[in-house]
Image (spheres, rainbow, N blue to C red):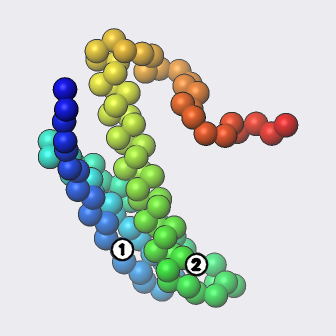
Amino acid sequence: MTRTLEWRLRLGLTEDDGTTRAEAVLDTGSAQLTGHGVARCNPQDVDVPAIGDELAASRAMKDVAAQLMKAADADLETVGAGPASGPVAPPYAWTDTTA
């Protein structure tokens, strides 16, 4: 079976007095997930708005990703395709342990 989908992500950023806020809205066509992220500039650091944008946006998208994973886990449990409770090891990437 071949399928093609397009999901749309809208990302809004606002900055006020060294605090950047981001809102990411993922529209799958059948559901919407909204994530939020905030970045604050340390008063002792140079204010570089692009860094605040990157941090807040990445945090908002990480929030959406966590919600999407939670929905996928629930769907998997519904069809009996895996444990949805208890700690689950990451499927890939570096481990959190150090040698």
Q: Can residue 31 be seen in this view?
A: no
Query: Given the image, on which type of amino acid does mark 1 rest?
Result: Leu
Which of the 4 image quadrants contains residue 74?
A: top left
Identify residue for label 1: 13
Q: How many residues crowd around disc 1 within 10 Å: few (fewer than 14), some, or many (20 or more)?
A: some
Identify residue for label 2: 41
Residue 37 in the image, given as x and y percentages of width and height: 44, 62
Q: Is residue 88 left or right of residue 14?
A: right
* Nearer-N-terminus badge (1/2): 1
Point 46% across, 67% down: residue: 56
Q: Is residue 32 left or right of residue 67?
A: left
Q: In this view, does 2 lie above or below 37?
A: above
Q: Is residue 88 above or below residue 41?
A: above
Name the residue furthest front: 2
Point 37% across, 42% down: residue: 67
Foreground pick, 15 / 1: 1
Looking at the rendering, in which quadrant would you find the N terminus?
top left
Q: How many residues crowd around disc 2 within 10 Å: few (fewer than 14), some, or many (20 or more)?
A: some
Looking at the rendering, in which quadrant would you find the C terminus?
top right
Q: Is residue 84 visible?
A: yes
Q: Distance between the residues labelled 1 and 2?
A: 15 Å
